[in-house]
Image: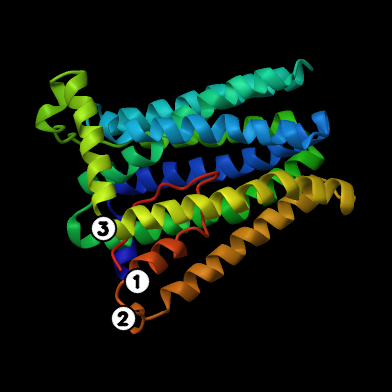
Amino acid sequence: MSRLVRVLKNRNFSFLWTGHTLSHLGDNIFRVALVWLIVTETNSARATALVFMAFFIPNILVSLFAGATVDRFSRKGVILASDGVRALMTVLLAALVLLDKVELWSVLCLYVFFGIADAFFQPAYTVIIHELVDRDLRASANSMNGIGRQIGVILGPALGAVLVETVGTVATFLLDTLCLVGSLLAIAMIRYRPKAGKEGAGNGSRSYLSEIREGLKHTFSVSWLWITMIVAALINAATTGTFNVALPFLVKETLGGGAGILGTVMTLYGAGALLGGLFIGSIRFREFPGRASPFICCCSRWGSPRWPLERSPPLPC
């Protein structure tokens, strides 16, 4: 506990953690409101799936370039830009709902930009921690990050559900915007001198692409790493669609419930992820075969995603 207090006494990290937590909270509030909006407006599982694809596909593709991009710009600036673009997209979506101009194509377009902006947040956040926190406190910083994520995963859906049912979708979207603006302000309060990027950062597109090729080459040279990534992708493909698309229709059509029931289920999911993480954290991994340990550690991180994907840095087992 004393180490957690010490890391929070770091002024820059405390602002960074506040922004990170508010961003997670806003994302999970937004999640409930958006899903329920699409389900009630279209009553179409295909349309709901298209909305998620509009986030996932650009987000995954841009993630290939996000790390190299973060090396070339201020990490703080990248985070501010990510929060700012997502806040703008949320305001535009709220305006469409308020004016009763919501159409599937407009939601898809806004969510594409939302996904692109989101792809840059976590890589920049991961790097900036190493610039703000001393090495001996980084484990404590990672613990605080986990706490921040769980605050968002557990409280966000509950707040979103209550707001959708009491004050409506527009107000819920605007609360997400306030969370993102709060994150923006907190990150803006950070004062630090950025470390210089890589030496090849200024050598043009060839250096930029070579960094990406180097990263991919390294990834696929470590067998357990690329195998784990493929297995994780297959499991996510099988489970994410079911949870994000089928669950709202189960709540609406089979259970006859509203956004409150959907938010409750999502909150319970987050609570289960927290309990699962505590259980996994109590296991002594050296009791397992050595080659199984990395896979188990990676699996243990699937329980608390930054919706829809969490790109948190792997911790050593």
- The location of residue 127, given as percent across then percent down, is 27, 43
- The location of residue 278, given as percent across then percent down, is 48, 72
Identity of the amino acid at label 3? Arg
Disc on the earlier residue, 2 or 1:
2
Mark 3 — residue?
A: 138
Spatial CA span between label 1 and label 3: 22 Å
Q: Residue at x 66, y 31 (%)?
A: 50
Residue 13 appears in the rendering: yes
- The location of residue 98, given as percent across then percent down, is 75, 20
Q: Secondary structure at mark 2?
A: helix
Residue 117 location, quadrant? top left
Q: Secondary structure at mark 1?
A: helix
Residue 8 appears in the rendering: no
Disc on the earlier residue, 3 or 2:
3
Mark 2 — residue?
A: 286
> Colour scheme in the image?
rainbow
Report if the CB atoms under discs 2 and 1 are less than 8 Å apart: yes
Disc on the earlier residue, 1 or 3:
3
Q: Residue at x 50, y 45 (%)?
A: 309
Mark 1 — residue?
A: 293
